[in-house]
Protein backbone atom coordinates (compact mmCIF):
# COMPACT_ATOMS: atom_id res chain seq x y z
CA UNK A 1 0.00 0.00 0.00
CA UNK A 2 2.93 2.33 0.68
CA UNK A 3 3.97 2.35 -2.98
CA UNK A 4 0.44 3.13 -4.10
CA UNK A 5 0.14 6.04 -1.68
CA UNK A 6 3.01 7.83 -3.42
CA UNK A 7 2.37 6.58 -6.96
CA UNK A 8 1.63 9.46 -9.30
CA UNK A 9 -0.59 9.66 -12.32
CA UNK A 10 1.58 11.08 -15.09
CA UNK A 11 0.58 14.20 -16.96
CA UNK A 12 0.32 12.04 -20.09
CA UNK A 13 -2.22 9.79 -18.37
CA UNK A 14 -4.21 12.80 -17.22
CA UNK A 15 -4.18 14.27 -20.72
CA UNK A 16 -5.21 10.88 -22.17
CA UNK A 17 -8.18 10.81 -19.84
CA UNK A 18 -9.04 14.34 -20.92
CA UNK A 19 -8.84 13.32 -24.59
CA UNK A 20 -11.09 10.34 -23.91
CA UNK A 21 -13.61 12.63 -22.27
CA UNK A 22 -13.46 15.00 -25.22
CA UNK A 23 -13.98 12.12 -27.66
CA UNK A 24 -17.00 11.02 -25.67
CA UNK A 25 -18.40 14.55 -25.59
CA UNK A 26 -18.68 14.33 -21.82
CA UNK A 27 -18.43 17.96 -20.70
CA UNK A 28 -19.23 20.95 -22.89
CA UNK A 29 -16.35 23.34 -23.62
CA UNK A 30 -18.25 26.62 -23.50
CA UNK A 31 -16.29 28.87 -21.10
CA UNK A 32 -14.19 31.76 -22.43
CA UNK A 33 -11.49 33.66 -20.54
CA UNK A 34 -14.08 36.31 -19.69
CA UNK A 35 -16.52 33.72 -18.35
CA UNK A 36 -13.75 32.14 -16.25
CA UNK A 37 -12.79 35.53 -14.86
CA UNK A 38 -16.41 36.20 -13.95
CA UNK A 39 -16.60 32.80 -12.24
CA UNK A 40 -13.53 33.75 -10.22
CA UNK A 41 -14.98 37.09 -9.19
CA UNK A 42 -18.25 35.34 -8.42
CA UNK A 43 -16.44 32.96 -6.08
CA UNK A 44 -14.37 35.65 -4.35
CA UNK A 45 -16.58 38.70 -3.78
CA UNK A 46 -19.21 37.76 -1.26
CA UNK A 47 -19.45 37.63 2.52
CA UNK A 48 -15.86 38.85 2.91
CA UNK A 49 -16.18 42.31 1.43
CA UNK A 50 -19.53 43.01 3.10
CA UNK A 51 -18.77 41.60 6.59
CA UNK A 52 -15.12 40.76 7.31
CA UNK A 53 -13.81 44.22 6.44
CA UNK A 54 -15.41 45.73 9.53
CA UNK A 55 -14.37 42.96 11.93
CA UNK A 56 -10.75 42.95 10.72
CA UNK A 57 -10.43 46.74 10.92
CA UNK A 58 -12.04 47.09 14.36
CA UNK A 59 -10.29 44.17 16.05
CA UNK A 60 -6.90 43.98 14.35
CA UNK A 61 -5.61 46.46 11.78
CA UNK A 62 -7.50 49.75 11.93
CA UNK A 63 -7.07 51.86 8.76
CA UNK A 64 -4.08 49.64 7.90
CA UNK A 65 -6.62 47.07 6.77
CA UNK A 66 -5.56 48.20 3.29
CA UNK A 67 -2.15 46.64 3.98
CA UNK A 68 -3.80 43.47 5.32
CA UNK A 69 -5.69 43.01 2.07
CA UNK A 70 -2.46 43.46 0.16
CA UNK A 71 -0.67 40.85 2.32
CA UNK A 72 -3.49 38.32 1.87
CA UNK A 73 -3.65 39.22 -1.81
CA UNK A 74 0.07 38.58 -2.26
CA UNK A 75 -0.25 35.16 -0.62
CA UNK A 76 -3.16 34.28 -2.86
CA UNK A 77 -1.35 35.72 -5.89
CA UNK A 78 1.60 33.37 -5.27
CA UNK A 79 -0.79 30.44 -5.02
CA UNK A 80 -2.73 31.75 -8.02
CA UNK A 81 0.41 31.79 -10.18
CA UNK A 82 1.07 28.16 -9.20
CA UNK A 83 -2.53 27.24 -9.99
CA UNK A 84 -2.17 28.97 -13.36
CA UNK A 85 0.92 26.92 -14.30
CA UNK A 86 -0.80 23.67 -13.41
CA UNK A 87 -4.10 24.66 -15.04
CA UNK A 88 -2.34 25.45 -18.32
CA UNK A 89 -0.19 22.32 -18.20
CA UNK A 90 -2.84 19.89 -16.89
CA UNK A 91 -6.12 21.33 -18.27
CA UNK A 92 -8.55 18.93 -16.63
CA UNK A 93 -11.20 19.09 -13.93
CA UNK A 94 -10.14 18.47 -10.38
CA UNK A 95 -8.18 21.56 -9.41
CA UNK A 96 -5.48 20.92 -6.78
CA UNK A 97 -6.55 17.28 -6.54
CA UNK A 98 -5.51 16.52 -10.13
CA UNK A 99 -2.34 18.57 -9.83
CA UNK A 100 -1.31 16.70 -6.68
CA UNK A 101 -1.99 13.35 -8.34
CA UNK A 102 0.60 14.28 -10.99
CA UNK A 103 3.26 15.35 -8.49
CA UNK A 104 2.95 14.01 -4.95
CA UNK A 105 1.07 10.72 -5.35
CA UNK A 106 -2.35 9.20 -4.91
CA UNK A 107 -2.41 9.24 -1.11
CA UNK A 108 -1.69 12.94 -0.83
CA UNK A 109 -4.02 13.62 -3.77
CA UNK A 110 -6.77 11.89 -1.83
CA UNK A 111 -6.00 14.05 1.22
CA UNK A 112 -6.21 17.22 -0.89
CA UNK A 113 -9.37 16.08 -2.66
CA UNK A 114 -10.94 15.27 0.70
CA UNK A 115 -9.99 18.76 1.95
CA UNK A 116 -11.43 20.37 -1.17
CA UNK A 117 -14.71 18.63 -0.38
CA UNK A 118 -14.44 20.23 3.07
CA UNK A 119 -13.79 23.64 1.47
CA UNK A 120 -16.45 23.72 -1.22
CA UNK A 121 -19.23 21.78 0.47
CA UNK A 122 -18.99 23.67 3.75
CA UNK A 123 -18.48 26.97 1.93
CA UNK A 124 -21.85 26.56 0.22
CA UNK A 125 -23.47 25.76 3.56
CA UNK A 126 -21.67 28.61 5.36
CA UNK A 127 -22.61 31.26 2.82
CA UNK A 128 -26.20 30.03 2.70
CA UNK A 129 -26.49 30.84 6.41
CA UNK A 130 -25.08 34.34 5.83
CA UNK A 131 -27.41 34.78 2.86
CA UNK A 132 -30.35 33.86 5.06
CA UNK A 133 -29.34 36.49 7.62
CA UNK A 134 -29.17 39.27 5.02
CA UNK A 135 -32.49 38.26 3.46
CA UNK A 136 -34.18 38.18 6.87
CA UNK A 137 -32.86 41.67 7.58
CA UNK A 138 -33.97 43.01 4.20
CA UNK A 139 -37.45 41.52 4.53
CA UNK A 140 -37.84 42.93 8.03
CA UNK A 141 -37.14 46.41 6.63
CA UNK A 142 -40.25 45.92 4.49
CA UNK A 143 -42.33 44.60 7.37
CA UNK A 144 -42.01 40.90 6.50
CA UNK A 145 -40.83 38.77 9.41
CA UNK A 146 -39.95 35.09 9.08
CA UNK A 147 -40.44 33.30 12.42
CA UNK A 148 -37.22 32.67 14.36
CA UNK A 149 -37.91 28.93 14.34
CA UNK A 150 -37.85 28.88 10.53
CA UNK A 151 -34.99 31.32 9.90
CA UNK A 152 -32.23 30.13 12.24
CA UNK A 153 -30.20 26.97 12.79
CA UNK A 154 -31.52 24.59 15.45
CA UNK A 155 -27.97 23.92 16.66
CA UNK A 156 -25.39 26.44 17.85
CA UNK A 157 -22.02 26.55 19.61
CA UNK A 158 -22.18 27.03 23.37
CA UNK A 159 -19.27 29.48 23.06
CA UNK A 160 -16.79 30.62 20.37
CA UNK A 161 -14.16 27.96 19.54
CA UNK A 162 -16.13 25.50 21.64
CA UNK A 163 -16.87 21.85 20.88
CA UNK A 164 -20.18 22.00 22.75
CA UNK A 165 -23.32 22.16 20.61
CA UNK A 166 -26.61 23.27 22.14
CA UNK A 167 -30.15 23.59 20.83
CA UNK A 168 -31.15 27.12 19.83
CA UNK A 169 -34.90 26.59 19.94
CA UNK A 170 -35.25 26.92 16.16
CA UNK A 171 -36.47 24.17 13.82
CA UNK A 172 -34.74 24.82 10.47
CA UNK A 173 -33.09 27.67 8.59
CA UNK A 174 -35.57 27.52 5.72
CA UNK A 175 -34.17 30.41 3.59
CA UNK A 176 -30.72 28.76 3.63
CA UNK A 177 -32.19 25.48 2.43
CA UNK A 178 -34.26 27.12 -0.30
CA UNK A 179 -31.43 29.16 -1.85
CA UNK A 180 -29.19 26.07 -2.04
CA UNK A 181 -32.02 24.15 -3.71
CA UNK A 182 -32.52 26.88 -6.33
CA UNK A 183 -28.81 27.18 -7.14
CA UNK A 184 -28.38 23.41 -7.29
CA UNK A 185 -31.09 23.35 -9.94
CA UNK A 186 -29.27 26.05 -11.94
CA UNK A 187 -26.00 24.07 -11.74
CA UNK A 188 -27.80 20.88 -12.76
CA UNK A 189 -29.24 22.47 -15.91
CA UNK A 190 -25.85 23.30 -17.42
CA UNK A 191 -22.47 25.02 -17.15
CA UNK A 192 -23.34 27.56 -19.86
CA UNK A 193 -26.55 28.54 -18.12
CA UNK A 194 -24.77 28.62 -14.75
CA UNK A 195 -22.01 30.79 -16.19
CA UNK A 196 -24.46 33.22 -17.76
CA UNK A 197 -26.46 33.43 -14.54
CA UNK A 198 -23.24 34.06 -12.61
CA UNK A 199 -22.14 36.75 -15.07
CA UNK A 200 -25.36 38.70 -14.54
CA UNK A 201 -25.04 38.48 -10.75
CA UNK A 202 -21.35 39.40 -10.77
CA UNK A 203 -22.01 42.43 -12.96
CA UNK A 204 -24.66 43.68 -10.55
CA UNK A 205 -22.68 43.14 -7.36
CA UNK A 206 -19.51 44.70 -8.78
CA UNK A 207 -21.64 47.69 -9.81
CA UNK A 208 -22.86 47.96 -6.21
CA UNK A 209 -19.30 47.80 -4.84
CA UNK A 210 -18.17 50.49 -7.28
CA UNK A 211 -21.24 52.59 -6.32
CA UNK A 212 -20.17 52.47 -2.66
CA UNK A 213 -16.59 53.44 -3.53
CA UNK A 214 -17.63 56.34 -5.75
CA UNK A 215 -20.30 57.69 -3.38
CA UNK A 216 -18.14 57.22 -0.31
CA UNK A 217 -15.13 59.08 -1.69
CA UNK A 218 -16.81 62.43 -1.08
CA UNK A 219 -17.44 61.64 2.59
CA UNK A 220 -13.99 60.51 3.67
CA UNK A 221 -12.78 62.19 6.86
CA UNK A 222 -8.99 62.10 6.71
CA UNK A 223 -8.78 62.20 10.51
CA UNK A 224 -10.21 58.66 10.55
CA UNK A 225 -7.02 57.45 8.85
CA UNK A 226 -4.77 58.72 11.65
CA UNK A 227 -2.93 56.89 13.01
CA UNK A 228 -2.86 54.70 9.92
CA UNK A 229 -1.35 51.81 11.91
CA UNK A 230 -2.74 52.14 15.46
CA UNK A 231 -0.37 51.54 18.34
CA UNK A 232 0.02 47.89 19.23
CA UNK A 233 -2.01 46.83 22.28
CA UNK A 234 -1.28 43.11 22.33
CA UNK A 235 -0.28 40.36 19.92
CA UNK A 236 -2.59 40.61 16.91
CA UNK A 237 -4.32 43.74 18.17
CA UNK A 238 -3.14 46.69 16.07
CA UNK A 239 0.44 47.45 15.13
CA UNK A 240 2.16 45.29 12.52
CA UNK A 241 1.11 42.11 14.30
CA UNK A 242 -2.48 43.29 13.90
CA UNK A 243 -1.94 43.88 10.19
CA UNK A 244 -0.84 40.27 9.74
CA UNK A 245 -3.56 38.94 12.05
CA UNK A 246 -6.15 40.79 9.97
CA UNK A 247 -4.70 39.28 6.79
CA UNK A 248 -5.46 35.84 8.24
CA UNK A 249 -9.04 36.89 9.02
CA UNK A 250 -9.73 38.41 5.61
CA UNK A 251 -8.15 35.46 3.81
CA UNK A 252 -11.69 34.04 3.87
CA UNK A 253 -12.57 36.83 1.44
CA UNK A 254 -10.25 35.36 -1.19
CA UNK A 255 -11.55 31.80 -1.07
CA UNK A 256 -13.04 30.99 -4.45
CA UNK A 257 -10.51 31.76 -7.18
CA UNK A 258 -9.30 28.14 -7.11
CA UNK A 259 -12.79 27.07 -8.16
CA UNK A 260 -11.93 28.27 -11.68
CA UNK A 261 -9.48 25.41 -12.09
CA UNK A 262 -12.21 22.83 -11.49
CA UNK A 263 -13.88 23.85 -14.78
CA UNK A 264 -10.81 23.29 -17.00
CA UNK A 265 -12.56 20.62 -19.07
CA UNK A 266 -15.31 23.10 -19.86
CA UNK A 267 -12.99 25.90 -21.00
CA UNK A 268 -12.71 26.60 -24.73
CA UNK A 269 -8.94 27.09 -24.64
CA UNK A 270 -7.79 26.02 -21.17
CA UNK A 271 -4.04 26.51 -21.76
CA UNK A 272 -4.61 30.20 -22.48
CA UNK A 273 -7.86 30.99 -20.70
CA UNK A 274 -7.29 29.32 -17.30
CA UNK A 275 -4.28 31.50 -16.30
CA UNK A 276 -6.13 34.60 -17.52
CA UNK A 277 -9.24 33.74 -15.50
CA UNK A 278 -7.34 32.92 -12.30
CA UNK A 279 -5.00 35.90 -12.30
CA UNK A 280 -7.46 38.47 -13.66
CA UNK A 281 -10.09 37.65 -11.04
CA UNK A 282 -7.48 37.91 -8.25
CA UNK A 283 -6.20 41.29 -9.46
CA UNK A 284 -9.69 42.76 -9.92
CA UNK A 285 -10.92 41.56 -6.52
CA UNK A 286 -7.79 42.74 -4.69
CA UNK A 287 -8.16 46.24 -6.17
CA UNK A 288 -11.83 46.33 -5.14
CA UNK A 289 -11.02 45.08 -1.63
CA UNK A 290 -8.29 47.70 -1.13
CA UNK A 291 -10.55 50.49 -2.40
CA UNK A 292 -13.50 49.44 -0.22
CA UNK A 293 -11.34 49.14 2.93
CA UNK A 294 -9.79 52.57 2.31
CA UNK A 295 -13.16 54.28 1.78
CA UNK A 296 -14.83 52.42 4.66
CA UNK A 297 -12.18 53.31 7.26
CA UNK A 298 -12.12 56.88 5.94
CA UNK A 299 -15.87 57.37 6.31
CA UNK A 300 -16.18 55.97 9.85
CA UNK A 301 -13.72 55.42 12.69
CA UNK A 302 -12.45 51.85 12.60
CA UNK A 303 -13.46 51.46 16.26
CA UNK A 304 -17.13 51.53 15.24
CA UNK A 305 -16.92 48.90 12.49
CA UNK A 306 -17.19 45.70 14.55
CA UNK A 307 -20.71 45.01 13.26
CA UNK A 308 -22.37 42.49 10.95
CA UNK A 309 -22.94 45.07 8.18
CA UNK A 310 -20.09 47.63 8.33
CA UNK A 311 -20.75 49.13 4.89
CA UNK A 312 -24.38 49.80 5.78
CA UNK A 313 -23.21 51.40 9.04
CA UNK A 314 -20.87 53.75 7.15
CA UNK A 315 -23.64 54.75 4.73
CA UNK A 316 -26.14 55.33 7.54
CA UNK A 317 -23.69 57.76 9.15
CA UNK A 318 -24.45 60.22 6.36
CA UNK A 319 -28.12 61.12 5.62
CA UNK A 320 -27.23 61.93 2.02
CA UNK A 321 -26.21 58.29 1.48
CA UNK A 322 -29.16 56.50 3.08
CA UNK A 323 -30.52 55.66 -0.37
CA UNK A 324 -27.41 53.59 -1.10
CA UNK A 325 -28.10 51.16 1.79
CA UNK A 326 -30.76 49.19 -0.08
CA UNK A 327 -28.57 48.63 -3.20
CA UNK A 328 -25.69 47.55 -0.93
CA UNK A 329 -27.89 45.04 0.89
CA UNK A 330 -29.04 43.69 -2.46
CA UNK A 331 -25.41 43.57 -3.61
CA UNK A 332 -24.46 41.56 -0.53
CA UNK A 333 -27.25 39.08 -1.23
CA UNK A 334 -26.22 38.81 -4.89
CA UNK A 335 -22.59 38.45 -3.88
CA UNK A 336 -23.30 35.52 -1.62
CA UNK A 337 -25.56 33.98 -4.26
CA UNK A 338 -22.78 33.88 -6.84
CA UNK A 339 -20.33 32.43 -4.29
CA UNK A 340 -22.70 29.55 -3.59
CA UNK A 341 -23.22 29.00 -7.31
CA UNK A 342 -19.49 28.80 -8.07
CA UNK A 343 -18.76 26.56 -5.08
CA UNK A 344 -21.56 24.17 -6.05
CA UNK A 345 -20.15 23.95 -9.58
CA UNK A 346 -16.66 23.30 -8.21
CA UNK A 347 -17.64 20.62 -5.71
CA UNK A 348 -19.57 18.58 -8.27
CA UNK A 349 -16.49 18.57 -10.52
CA UNK A 350 -14.20 17.48 -7.68
CA UNK A 351 -16.53 14.51 -7.14
CA UNK A 352 -16.44 13.87 -10.89
CA UNK A 353 -12.63 13.83 -11.09
CA UNK A 354 -12.18 11.58 -8.06
CA UNK A 355 -14.79 9.16 -9.36
CA UNK A 356 -13.05 9.09 -12.76
CA UNK A 357 -9.95 7.83 -10.93
CA UNK A 358 -11.93 5.19 -9.05
CA UNK A 359 -11.44 6.82 -5.66
CA UNK A 360 -15.15 7.52 -5.28
CA UNK A 361 -18.14 5.49 -6.53
CA UNK A 362 -18.62 5.65 -10.30
CA UNK A 363 -22.06 7.19 -9.92
CA UNK A 364 -20.29 10.52 -9.26
CA UNK A 365 -18.81 10.40 -12.77
CA UNK A 366 -22.22 10.25 -14.46
CA UNK A 367 -22.88 13.02 -16.96
CA UNK A 368 -26.42 14.07 -17.77
CA UNK A 369 -27.10 13.27 -21.47
CA UNK A 370 -28.91 16.54 -22.15
CA UNK A 371 -27.32 19.08 -19.82
CA UNK A 372 -23.77 17.60 -19.91
CA UNK A 373 -23.20 18.26 -16.22
CA UNK A 374 -22.00 15.92 -13.44
CA UNK A 375 -25.56 15.44 -12.30
CA UNK A 376 -25.10 13.03 -9.38
CA UNK A 377 -22.32 15.12 -7.86
CA UNK A 378 -24.41 18.27 -8.22
CA UNK A 379 -27.41 16.70 -6.47
CA UNK A 380 -25.27 15.28 -3.65
CA UNK A 381 -23.49 18.61 -3.18
CA UNK A 382 -26.74 20.55 -3.04
CA UNK A 383 -28.47 18.07 -0.76
CA UNK A 384 -25.62 17.92 1.76
CA UNK A 385 -25.08 21.69 1.75
CA UNK A 386 -28.80 22.31 2.25
CA UNK A 387 -28.95 19.97 5.25
CA UNK A 388 -25.76 21.36 6.84
CA UNK A 389 -26.70 25.00 6.21
CA UNK A 390 -30.21 24.42 7.51
CA UNK A 391 -29.03 22.89 10.79
CA UNK A 392 -25.76 24.55 11.85
CA UNK A 393 -24.59 28.14 12.56
CA UNK A 394 -22.24 30.11 10.34
CA UNK A 395 -19.45 30.33 12.94
CA UNK A 396 -19.00 26.59 13.27
CA UNK A 397 -19.10 26.03 9.51
CA UNK A 398 -16.81 28.91 8.58
CA UNK A 399 -13.93 27.62 10.69
CA UNK A 400 -13.78 24.44 8.65
CA UNK A 401 -13.60 26.12 5.25
CA UNK A 402 -10.33 28.01 5.49
CA UNK A 403 -8.03 25.26 6.68
CA UNK A 404 -8.99 22.92 3.82
CA UNK A 405 -8.34 25.71 1.30
CA UNK A 406 -4.98 26.67 2.77
CA UNK A 407 -3.83 23.05 2.77
CA UNK A 408 -4.61 22.85 -0.94
CA UNK A 409 -2.76 26.13 -1.63
CA UNK A 410 0.39 24.95 0.17
CA UNK A 411 0.33 21.64 -1.70
CA UNK A 412 -0.07 23.28 -5.12
CA UNK A 413 2.84 25.66 -4.42
CA UNK A 414 5.09 22.74 -3.45
CA UNK A 415 3.82 20.63 -6.35
CA UNK A 416 4.98 23.15 -8.95
CA UNK A 417 8.54 22.99 -7.65
CA UNK A 418 8.51 19.20 -7.53
CA UNK A 419 7.26 18.86 -11.10
CA UNK A 420 9.83 21.41 -12.31
CA UNK A 421 12.49 19.05 -10.92
CA UNK A 422 11.00 15.67 -11.88
CA UNK A 423 9.57 16.62 -15.30
CA UNK A 424 11.47 19.64 -16.67
CA UNK A 425 10.66 18.42 -20.21
CA UNK A 426 6.92 19.05 -19.96
CA UNK A 427 5.41 21.81 -22.06
CA UNK A 428 4.33 24.70 -19.85
CA UNK A 429 2.16 27.23 -21.74
CA UNK A 430 2.32 29.39 -18.61
CA UNK A 431 5.29 29.41 -16.23
CA UNK A 432 5.45 30.71 -12.68
CA UNK A 433 7.99 33.56 -12.65
CA UNK A 434 10.91 33.14 -10.19
CA UNK A 435 9.55 29.74 -9.05
CA UNK A 436 11.82 29.29 -6.04
CA UNK A 437 10.72 32.65 -4.66
CA UNK A 438 7.07 32.47 -5.73
CA UNK A 439 6.34 28.86 -4.77
CA UNK A 440 8.19 28.92 -1.46
CA UNK A 441 6.74 32.34 -0.67
CA UNK A 442 3.21 31.10 -1.37
CA UNK A 443 3.70 28.01 0.79
CA UNK A 444 5.13 30.08 3.66
CA UNK A 445 2.43 32.76 3.57
CA UNK A 446 -0.39 30.21 3.41
CA UNK A 447 1.31 28.03 6.02
CA UNK A 448 1.54 31.01 8.35
CA UNK A 449 -2.18 31.62 7.94
CA UNK A 450 -2.82 27.98 8.84
CA UNK A 451 -0.80 28.44 12.03
CA UNK A 452 -3.05 31.34 13.11
CA UNK A 453 -6.22 29.23 13.03
CA UNK A 454 -7.69 28.21 16.42
CA UNK A 455 -6.89 24.79 17.96
CA UNK A 456 -10.50 23.63 17.64
CA UNK A 457 -10.24 23.99 13.87
CA UNK A 458 -7.19 21.72 13.85
CA UNK A 459 -9.04 19.12 15.90
CA UNK A 460 -11.95 19.17 13.46
CA UNK A 461 -9.49 18.82 10.57
CA UNK A 462 -7.98 15.74 12.24
CA UNK A 463 -11.44 14.20 12.66
CA UNK A 464 -12.28 14.95 9.01
CA UNK A 465 -8.94 13.48 7.90
CA UNK A 466 -9.49 10.28 9.89
CA UNK A 467 -12.90 9.84 8.27
CA UNK A 468 -11.27 10.39 4.87
CA UNK A 469 -8.52 7.88 5.61
CA UNK A 470 -11.12 5.24 6.45
CA UNK A 471 -12.98 5.93 3.18
CA UNK A 472 -9.72 5.71 1.20
CA UNK A 473 -8.55 2.47 2.84
CA UNK A 474 -11.86 0.64 2.48
CA UNK A 475 -12.94 2.07 -0.90
CA UNK A 476 -10.50 4.37 -2.72
CA UNK A 477 -7.44 2.15 -2.39
CA UNK A 478 -9.37 -0.94 -3.48
CA UNK A 479 -11.01 0.70 -6.49
CA UNK A 480 -8.23 3.01 -7.75
CA UNK A 481 -7.84 2.73 -11.52
CA UNK A 482 -4.19 3.78 -11.44
CA UNK A 483 -2.88 0.39 -10.35
CA UNK A 484 -5.33 -1.95 -12.03
CA UNK A 485 -4.46 -3.78 -15.23
CA UNK A 486 -6.28 -2.31 -18.22
CA UNK A 487 -8.63 -5.28 -18.45
CA UNK A 488 -9.69 -4.82 -14.85
CA UNK A 489 -10.49 -1.13 -15.12
CA UNK A 490 -14.27 -0.79 -15.14
CA UNK A 491 -15.83 0.76 -18.19
CA UNK A 492 -16.88 4.38 -18.08
CA UNK A 493 -20.32 4.93 -16.71
CA UNK A 494 -22.75 5.77 -19.50
CA UNK A 495 -24.62 9.01 -19.37
CA UNK A 496 -27.72 8.60 -17.27
CA UNK A 497 -31.05 8.36 -18.97
CA UNK A 498 -33.16 11.46 -19.29
Image (cartoon, grey):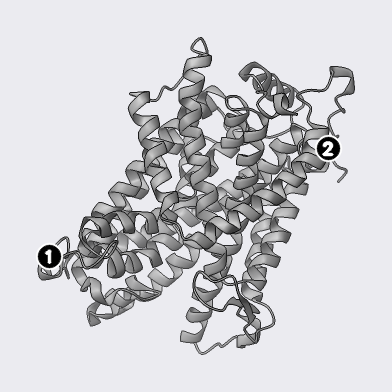
- Residue at point 59% right, 53% down? 461
- Nearer to us of marks 2 and 1 is 1
**SS at badge 2:** loop
Left/right of residue 458 with respect to residue 431 in the rendered view:
right
In depth, the one of 399 and 252 nearer the eye is 399
Disc on res. 355: none
Q: Is residue 438 left or right of residue 477?
A: left
Vertical position of residue 123 compared to residue 496: above or below: below
Query: In this orientation, which residue lies closer to the viewer: 433 or 288?
Result: 433
Q: Which mark is residue 227?
A: 1
Quadrant (top left/top right/bottom left/bottom right) for the N terminus: top right
**Which residue is drawn at the image coordinates 17% and 60% (left, top)?**
229
Give the answer, above or below, for where 60 lies relative to 281.
below
* Residue 125 falls in image quadrant: bottom right
Label 2 CA crowd tier, 10 Å (few <14, some 14–19, many 20+)? some
Image spot of residue 494 (x, y percent): 86, 34
In three-dimensional space, the C-alpha distance between marks 2 and 1, rounded to whole angstroms, equals 62 Å
Which mark sits nearer the N-terminus, 2 or 1? 1
Residue 95 seen in the figure: no
The percent coordinates of residue 170 (x first, y second) are 65, 84
Does residue 492 appear to the left or right of 196 in the view shown?
right
From the image, tell me which residue sits under label 2. 495
Instruction: State the image quarter where residue 301 is shown.
Output: bottom left
Amino acid sequence: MKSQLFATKTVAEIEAADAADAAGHKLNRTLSATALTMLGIGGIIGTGIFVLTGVAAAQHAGPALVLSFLVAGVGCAFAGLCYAEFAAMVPVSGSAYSYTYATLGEGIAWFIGWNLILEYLFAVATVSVGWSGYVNRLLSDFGVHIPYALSHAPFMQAAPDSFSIVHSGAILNVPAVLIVAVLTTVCYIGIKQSSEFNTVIVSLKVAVVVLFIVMGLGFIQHANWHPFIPRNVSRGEYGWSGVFAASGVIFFAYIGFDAISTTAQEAKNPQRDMPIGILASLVICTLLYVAVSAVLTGMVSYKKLDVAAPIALALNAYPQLHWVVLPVDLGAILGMTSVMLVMTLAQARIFYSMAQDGLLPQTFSKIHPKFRTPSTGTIVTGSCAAVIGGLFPVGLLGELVSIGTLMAFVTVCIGVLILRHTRPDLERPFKVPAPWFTCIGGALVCGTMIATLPPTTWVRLVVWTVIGAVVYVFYGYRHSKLHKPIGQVPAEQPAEAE
